[in-house]
Amino acid sequence: VEASIPEPQREAWLKHQVSGFKDKDGFESEVVRHVETTLARSMFNCDESAAYSACSLAFRDRLILEWNRTQQRQTFADSKRLYYLSLEFLMGRALDNAMLNIGEKDTAKAGLADLGFRIEDVIEQEHDAALGNGGLGRLAACFLDSLASLNYPAWGYGLRYRYGIFKQEIIDGYQVEVPDYWLDFNPWEFPRHDVTVDIQFFGNVRKSTDENGRTVAHWEGGEIVKAVAYDVPIPGYATPSTNNLRLWSSTAASGEFDFQKFNNGDYESSVADQQRAETISAVLYPNDNLERGKELRLKQQYFWVAASLYDIVRRFKKSKRPWKEFPDQVAIQLNDTHPTLAVVELQRILLDLEGLEWDEAWNIVTNTFGYTNHTVLPEALEKWSVPLIQHLLPRHLQIIYDINLYFLQSVERRFPDERELLGRVSIIEESQPKMVRMAHLAIVGSHKVNGVAELHSDLIKTTIFKDFVTIFGPDKFTNVTNGITPRRWLHQANPRLSELISSKAGGKDFLTDLNELNKIELHVKDKAFRKEWADIKLANKQRLAKHIKASAGVTVDPTALFDVQVKRIHEYKRQQLNIFGVIHRYLTLKAMSPEERKKQQPRVSIFGGKAAPGYWMAKQIIHLINSVGKVVNNDEDIGDLLKVVFLEDYNVSKAEIIIPASDISEHISTAGTEASGTSNMKFVLNGGLIIGTCDGANIEITREIGENNIFLFGNLAEDVEDLRHAHTYGSHEIDPDLNRVFQEIEKGTFGSTQDFAALISAVRDHGDYYLVSDDFHSYIETQALVDEAYRNQEEWITKCITSVARMGFFSSDRCINEYAEGIWNIEPLRVEKEEGA
Ligand code: RUG
């Protein structure tokens, strides 16, 4: 790269090369420089917020230098890259992560102390980057961390929402949504005003014939919106590799048209255009596992996909390689169906703009894309109305119809007698209006389709995508069980446990090879080790107890059993089962004599999670939890035996406090509904046990850690359909204990009975789709086993240590290596450590 610059100029550049801070002194001088120049402040008015900004800028400078080098290295190596397309990246805070991944947290701690600040307070200043709803977005963030840490040449592409997931407030027990404006000061992004792409919407398609007699489509007219790139550096752990996350922001295209409007005095309308354009990237849709088919959402999808592909194609074209080599240079992963229009857009680029023939183009497209499915829930499977696509993206609709035609023709040739098969696999659903089934398009347009846990990958092959397995064969469908990054979810969230583990595992290698954790199993009987283990858990619980007091106003005893369920609120995740179980516990305790009560295991039931603003049932669940808490927490008969807490505004930084403090966490979805779950992995990795159904990754966690170390209950996925059928067509007896709970709610013990009627009738009168009653008895019994097991602290600690030791499989590094080898066909770039600054 350097060779293209003439010698004297190169010398000048190299002489003045910036290197970023090297030690504590250098760090301090960078912080002071940023306070005084970048922020225009001084030591007299540098508060914690300014210290955070300056400290972040000092680290950002380091990152950006490594980012530049990494990009140069990748360009020079000219090897295949992965592009991860995700509408959500739930990154959380960046400063702590950057300090730890770069390996300079101690330097920063000492430097900040010299300047008069506590590092914890400075870290606390950061606003979470919350560009995601839940598991899907956080998985994308873990994947970015692993890709960089493993030195893979990879970019993430997403949207730079002005408003991330809303902030949740609990007022009188109800969820209230408040906008999350997070961009006030964000030192972690670099606006690239020179990297812009014009994105077209609406208009019409004209066809002409070229000199070779070939029909050429021209997409004309309509409206142009400009995409501006914002780059976020993603540091790898213990490597100089720093990858890029490119987020697109929308703005009005500054065309002559606007200018003319303005000159003509039509100021209002030119401002309205600007605002309309900016709306595209304004807000993250707050739905998890639910699609609503809104036009603006489709606009977001195309805007992001078109800008990203333009960027990817531009980069490829610089290499001057022939088009057929595109899949050798580029792998694109579709994170769920949200980016599926990328399949159509690449076909359009190759066909209409680059002049390739259909088959040649389609071959390139299908060899480029991979598709990850994250759900089997029907309400989450994306469909877009044909008239909407026709209106917004007229050329794309034509291409979708052509893709479908050729696909169905090939199916018909191979299965001439199966007329119904065509209707079932068609990309177009023959409804009123017709709909485009995005999952079908993603499958047809990709060379690999994967689920995210073994059970889930089996289920998609035998249920929703069964016909496609018949058509394409089983090899196209594969499994990559999800994972989590141990850097954030152990080292950062639980520094003392990380330190203790490294003292027994022979250093920090477990952070880059999580299987090294198994070394601690040898020490499971070591008294001092066990003592320190228990002390750390208690300290983490004390920290959470403080947080509970400050945010929910409830005093909890840190020695009680902490039972945690934190995740999006959803009927399939069954927080209602949990709270019904809590009521049952409360009633049981109330019925006991004071002597009997004294023998019971004290418990704190902790809930957290957001409900989609339009999801009424989920909001009722939150209200019930808070209403139960109000009664139970103030009942003098009960005291510390049971406390019920709803922690408002669950997000990544709160997860970092909550997860290390858990004794038992709940992963209790109806079997067959939770694709994987990833918080189950985080809790176990932090020395908490789990109670769960045989669903998602719980099954593989059991396989790894052993049946004795997990509390499983409930019906199996294979029985769910029959049970539902029986509820609808046979008699449906409600579990008697659950009935008692319902009666208590209906008596008004927890306030207005009207509010909770729907939660009860979903079980009693509407078929109990989520099998709450069927699983209730098993759930209650298993919770009793949890109490019993917890009473034997020695055995409990043994279970915890053994489980952590066996969690190696769940590192997102393992997943990324599986994707790289089995789907993307990419190699890591070797990096010498000294190469970095
Ligand atoms: O619900 C799933 C989780 O089970 C899974 O762990 C996570 C990551 O794979 O994705 C979640 N998910 C699925 N979020 N949105 C969807 C459907 O769009």
Image (cartoon, grey):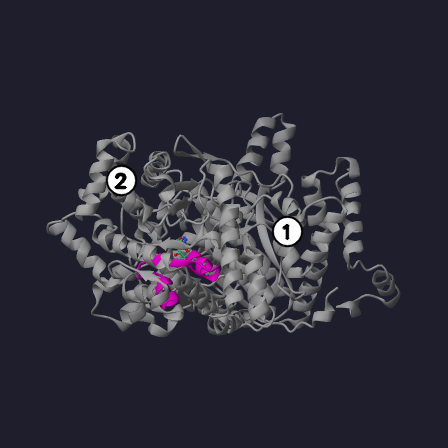
List the single residue furthest toward the front. Answer: 595
Measured from the top left, where is residue 94 in percent x and y? 61, 51
Q: Which residue is mark 1?
A: 95
Secondary structure under tag 2 reads: helix
How dense is the environment of label 2, judged by Cα within 10 Å: few (below 14), some, or many (20 and up)? some
Is residue 754 rendered magenta in the image? no
Q: Nearer the viewer, residue 766 or 664?
A: 664
> Dot 1, how many residues are within 10 Å of its Cα: few (below 14), some (14-19), or many (20+)?
many
> Do we see residue 326 in this rendering?
yes
- Nearer to us of marks 1 and 2 is 2
For marks 1 and 2 on the same chain, the one whose residue lies earlier in the sequence: 1
- Mark 1 → mark 2, Cα distance in angstroms: 48 Å
Q: Nearer the viewer, residue 759 or 505?
A: 505
Mark carried by residue 590:
2
Q: Is residue 171 above or below residue 783?
A: above
Instruction: Find residue 151 and report its image quarter.
Output: bottom right
Amino acid at circle 1: Leu
Choose between 796 and 252: the one closer to the eye. Answer: 796
Q: What residue appears at the point 53 percent right and 52 percent down from the top-left corner?
A: 539
State which quarter of the image contains the C terminus: bottom right
Q: Residue at x 48, y 67 (%)?
A: 815
Q: Is residue 233 above or below residue 252?
A: below
Instruction: Return the residue found at the far top.
Output: 265
Give ligand 1's quarter of the image.
bottom left
Question: In terms of image quadrants, where is residue 245?
Answer: bottom right
Q: Is residue 30 left or right of residue 555?
A: right
Residue 375 visible in the picture: no
Could you tell me which residue is drawn at 52 percent across and 49 percent down? 657
Q: Amino acid at mark 2?
A: Lys
Q: Is residue 668 above or below residue 419?
A: above
Q: Which residues are magenta?
A: 678-702
Q: Residue furthest right?
A: 8
